[in-house]
Image (cartoon, rainbow, N blue to C red):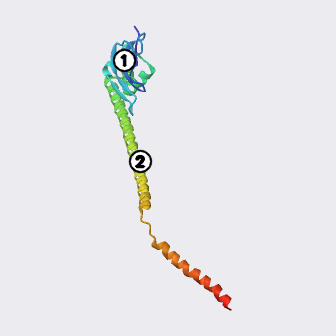
Amino acid sequence: MSTKIRLQRGGRKGRPVYSIVVADARAKRDGRFIEKLGTYNPNTNPATIDLNFDSTLSWVMKGAQPTDTARAILSYRGVMMKKHLLEGVRKGALTEEQAEAKFEAWVSEKENKIEGKVQSLNEAAQASRSARLAAEAEVNNARKAAIEAANAPVVEEAPAEEVTEEAPAAEATEEAPAEESAE
């Protein structure tokens, strides 16, 4: 019996959630499986992967073949790295302690990388939020100024002064032709 480690789809339309399972290669995608190893949720950023590491490593060491996507997930979580190191121990290239030290170093580096990504995503979200709030405040201030301008009382004294200033000039122009006709 050939076994595969593959994804079994669940969730609603457009929002998939996958179970990582070990199944007979002849079984349907969402059909019968031997063991559920974990879950994979690609809807979050970064994607959420819950995996039973020991059971998955056991199945990989027994010869279960992961599909391409499952292999990428297992590599991301370190199962394939651990398998590689254990094969080196079995062949005599490494000691158990050396393999464990290499794996711990890899895991800590991977966790730092993931933490850095989460931090950068949080900072980007915070910057986006503050930019949106600043833009909203600017729009609100512009609206407030427009409303104040529309509701401001109309001052009639200023136009009246302009009219009185223009009136003497008009009278002076009228008087000048009258003087010319008198001569």
Q: Quadrant of residue 108?
A: top left
Q: Could you tell me which residue is drawn at 37 percent across and 38 percent down?
A: 118
Residue drawn at the location 61% of the way across and 85% of the way down: 175
Viewer-closest of 29 and 2: 29
Name the amino acid type tagged 1: Val
Q: CA distance from mark 2 to mark 1?
A: 43 Å
Residue on which the image places disc 2 = 132
| Quadrant of the image occupied by residue 40 | top left
Residue 104: x %, y % from top left: 33, 29
5 sits left or right of 183 in the view? left
Above or below, comparing residue 98 to residue 162 in the picture:
above
Give SS at disc 2.
helix
Instruction: Please say if 146 is above or below 159.
Output: above
- 92 with respect to 174 (left or right): left
Pointer 2 and pointer 1: residues touching (CB < 8 Å)? Answer: no
Above or below — where is 80 with respect to 163?
A: above
Residue for badge 1: 21
Q: Where residue 117 sits in the image (x, y, percent)?
A: 39, 37
**Relative depth, front residue between 153 and 44:** 153
10 Å crowding of disc 2: few (<14), some (14-19), many (20+): few
- For the N terminus, the quadrant is top left
**Who is closer to the viewer here, 122 or 76?**
122
Q: Which tag, 2 or 1, sits closer to the chain's start?
A: 1
